[in-house]
Amino acid sequence: MKHIIVSLIILICSTSLFPQFGSQDSGGPLTPEWAAYDVKFYNINLNINPDKQTINGWVGVTVEAVSNMKEFVLDLDDKYRITKIIWDSPTESKEISFKHENGKIKIQLPEEVAIGQSFTVKIYYNGKPGIAKNPPWDDGFTWGKTKNGDHWVGVTCQGGGADTWWPCKDHPSDEPDSVLLNWSVPLNLICVSNGKLRYVLDNKEGTKTFCWFVSTPINNYGVSINIAPYDTLQYKYTSITGEEIPVTIWVLPENIEKAREHCSEFLDHLKWYEELLGPYPFRLDKYGVAESPYLGMEHQTIIANGYGYRDDQFGFDWLHHHELGHEWWGNMVTAKDWSDFWIHEAICGYMQTLYIEEKLSDRSPFAFMMNWKLWKNEQPVAPRKEMTSSDAYTNDMYSKGSYVLHTLRYYVGDDTFKMILRRWAYPDSEMEKVTDGSQCRFATTDEFLEIAEKVSDRELDWFWEVYFRQAKLPVLQAIIENGFLYLEWKIENNLPFSVPVEVKLEGEITKVEMREGAGSIKIPEGVEPVIDPDKWLTMSDVEFKNLNK
Ligand SMILES: [Zn+2]
């Protein structure tokens, strides 16, 4: 039975958890047009019409020129019709010319903008957004219905980027300092979004506008909406900093009792993360969870949760635990390029293993990790090139990356590993106190190496090179000869590698040092050695030879 369950999970993982994103894509090499400016502020004002499945409105984009600019290029899918673009300066407001083709809006600026100068344009547009066929792995709107027949709407765009529904710079390396969100929806519905709710306006025309404000940087795919006739569960949560964080769970009315019984677990998850990684990063805004018509997504301060208020076979709400982890790994600490995507997914994935190990002692964290072991070893966990999100999103980046962290933990030791995690999240303890947005940063695989070396006081570049930059797994050769077990690492391109290997002999585990990639241990006669008995090592199957036989 257990085998069937595990096989089933693997099947589910392989068919639905790791498909490539659709034809829409995000990021890739940073073009000169993208590099020309730095986004400061998005002001998004959209009417969402669930009956017609359309959106219309305008988005203000404020940027600072990084080089002198005559033309300004933004991204928006061609399926939308742009009706006008307004140059919005303090002295004048006028329509300006543009071209919208191949997913790009090329805007002629009315005057050259010099380096360091800021400007704002407003893009007025409308259209029918794409429908996500397999959310959250597919981009677009989910126009769902509740049991009572009410509208229940969500949006996902991690793969294709936010330009699948609003004009933006579709590259992960640029986040606005803050965002204002005005969502207009039918009167009977509630629109839940990122940041803090400022006010709700009755438009006297059958719609209400929900005004939300995000006070920190946010990645584009993190901006989202959840529309339904939601009920709420509200909690007061005291952060490890002593600050009170409002926690709200938006629940479909028919599920409120089920949610009430289940959701206190969410606060346990929050506490666990804070103790491990430092404070919840968005204390000034809120922590929110919205019931979604798809499995889930890490939308900043408003996690989408469609897991049905239940625990999985490991005894906890895996989905919530994972998505909450992204508030640190992805939302506060963001990969500068999609090639560093493991910083979001591999680390966040390993959080569940640590949680099971600490909190659910009757369950197997190892079994949890093995559920995800579908590696192909065709592409490094962190390739050294600029990548689009769909190129970067592989199972290796995700679950092999998690396993590499397991090996790193074994190599540096538990306490050091936990301190590395904490400093990856917050590079120093002063940053743990900050809430003004400067707690958010872009990270790279190389920065994470630097921090890990500093915290552990060890050289780790060889570890990074083999595990993050090469696709092939280390191979361990084991030969028994003349009463000894000889071990040797075989590494692609003969790179240096010296992770020690544990060997179990007659019930006792010994760590064999692998200086210059090789080591040995005496074997009592007739004893079968067990290599890496606790499965710490990310490697291929051991190549084993017994020359004594
Ligand atoms: Zn994730």
Image (cartoon, rainbow, N blue to C red):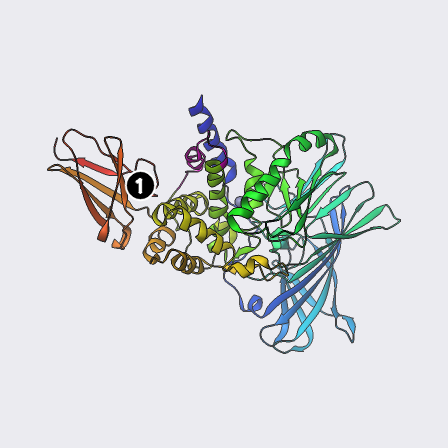
Relative to 444, 24 lies left or right: right
Q: Residue at x 67, y 29 (%)?
A: 258
Residue identified by numbered label 1: 540
User: What residue sits 22% from the left and 42% below the top?
Assistant: 477
Q: Residue at x 40, y 51 (%)?
A: 416
Mark 1 belongs to which amino acid?
Ser
Specify the segment rendered in magenta: 359-375
- Seen in the image, is 205 located left or right of residue 438? right
- The location of residue 422, given as percent across then percent down, is 49, 53
Please check the rendered image and state whether residue 355 is part of the magenta-colored stretch, yes or no: no
Locate the N terminus by quadrant.
top left
Q: Residues within 10 Å of mark 1 (few under 14, many from 20)?
A: few
Q: Secondary structure at mark 1?
A: loop
At 46% from the left and 45% from the top, the residue drawn is 398
**Front-most of residues 465 and 486:** 486
Q: Determine if residue 137 is in view.
A: no
Q: Position of residue 246 (x, y in %)?
A: 69, 47
Q: Is residue 13 visible?
A: yes
- Left or right position of 509 against 223: left
Q: Position of residue 315 (x, y in %)?
A: 53, 30
Q: Residue furthest front?
A: 242
Residue 463, x across and y down, in percent: 34, 53
